[in-house]
Every structure is written in structure tokens, then in C-alpha cells.
Amino acid sequence: MFVSCMSQKDYIAEYDFNYSGNFKRYKTFGFVGSPNNLPSEDSLEYFKTIEKTISNRLGSQGFKFQDEKPDLLINYKVFRDPVKYRGYEQPNFDFWLERRSEHIDMEKLMEEEEREKDENYNRVKYLENEGLLVIYVIDNKRGNTIWQGYTAAAFDFMSPEIQTDLTRATYRVMDQFRILTRN
């Protein structure tokens, strides 16, 4: 038991979000393009694993997959080489969402908007990693990224455990996207 616990990879996920995202109105999702120009059939399997994991997670949160004109477009990238990545120090996402969804009068709304002007994107540089999985959530109507989650990971694509590793890392990132919707 002790050996199996120590051998599992622990993916630490971080995320950033766009203050202009209207997170309560999104109900459907789709994926950006298709990975047609992959170097091998194996790569296609890896991307299917990531997409299936994302779809399962979003489905459990009430989102519906929609091929044509979804509210959210999902894109992802696996960096296999060392990469330096920049994130942002922001308020807790759940707290921020709760504050945004409260029913408030116009005077309070004006006060909140003034305070939000002070909410900025304080950059945080992460150390160089041996690899990275990044998942982007894009507002399809506006065309801008509203949320991105990432985890440092040096995936061994030759390992028999690669599908499991990709699934775990993807779930860990998507666990940070805590939006529920009603369809």
C-alpha cells in the first residue's frame, strides 16, 4: 500500500481567469479544431484521452457538448520540452464568482465596479518545468480566453501509464474550473 501511494504522480494545478468572463451564462462547450496534423496515431489517442476527460468533467458540471457554435471553446496544449510559464495572482475563483453573482442594488454595483478596477493581473512567473499541460477555456462569442488551468508535468509518452497520467493531470486541472450550469 505504501509503495503504490508513493508511486502515484501528484499533479499540482494552478489557474487564472479573466475578470470579464460571464461565467454564469455558459451552458455548452466544444473543442477548438481537431488535431489533424499529429505526428502519429499514438498522439491522436493521447488527445482523445484529454478530450474525453475534459468532456466527462464538464458534463458532470451540467455543460452539454455542442459541435456548432458552443458557448465555450476548449483548447489544450501539452508542452513536452522545458517551458517557463507565467500565471497571475488573483482572488480565489469561487469567492470571486460568489461575489459576482450576488443580487445587489445599483449603488452596490457601482461600488463593486470601482473596487474591481483595482483587481488587476499581478504576474507570477513559474520556474522552468520539464513539461506542462495547459487547458484554455475561451468565450466563443467574444473570442477571448476566460480561464486557463495548467499543471507542470513531464509526461513519458513511452510509458504504459501515459493514458492514466494524462487523465489524472487533466482531471487535476479541470477540478479547478468549478462552474456549474443548468441546462
Image: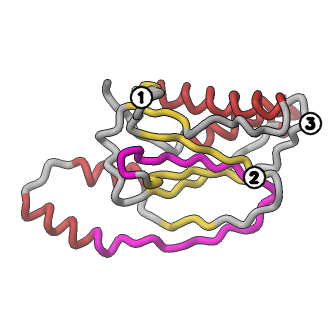
Q: Please name the residue shown 44% across and 26% down the image.
A: 66
Which residue is nearer to you in this view: 65 or 59? Answer: 65
Q: Please name the residue shown 24% across and 48% down the image.
A: 101
- Residue range in magenta is 116-142
> Residue farthest to the right?
158
Residue 83 - label: none
State yes or no: discs 1 and 2 in contact (Cβ < 8 Å).
no
Circle 3 residue:
158
Q: What element carries label 3?
A: loop
Q: Please name the residue shown 48% across and 43% down the image.
A: 177
Depicted 136 relative to depicted 127: above or below: above
Circle 1 residue:
63
Tag 3 or tag 1, which sits nearer the N-term?
Answer: 1
Q: Mark 1 belongs to which amino acid?
A: Phe
Depicted 55 relative to depicted 15: above or below: above
Circle 2 residue:
79
Which residue is nearer to you in this view: 150 or 5? Answer: 150
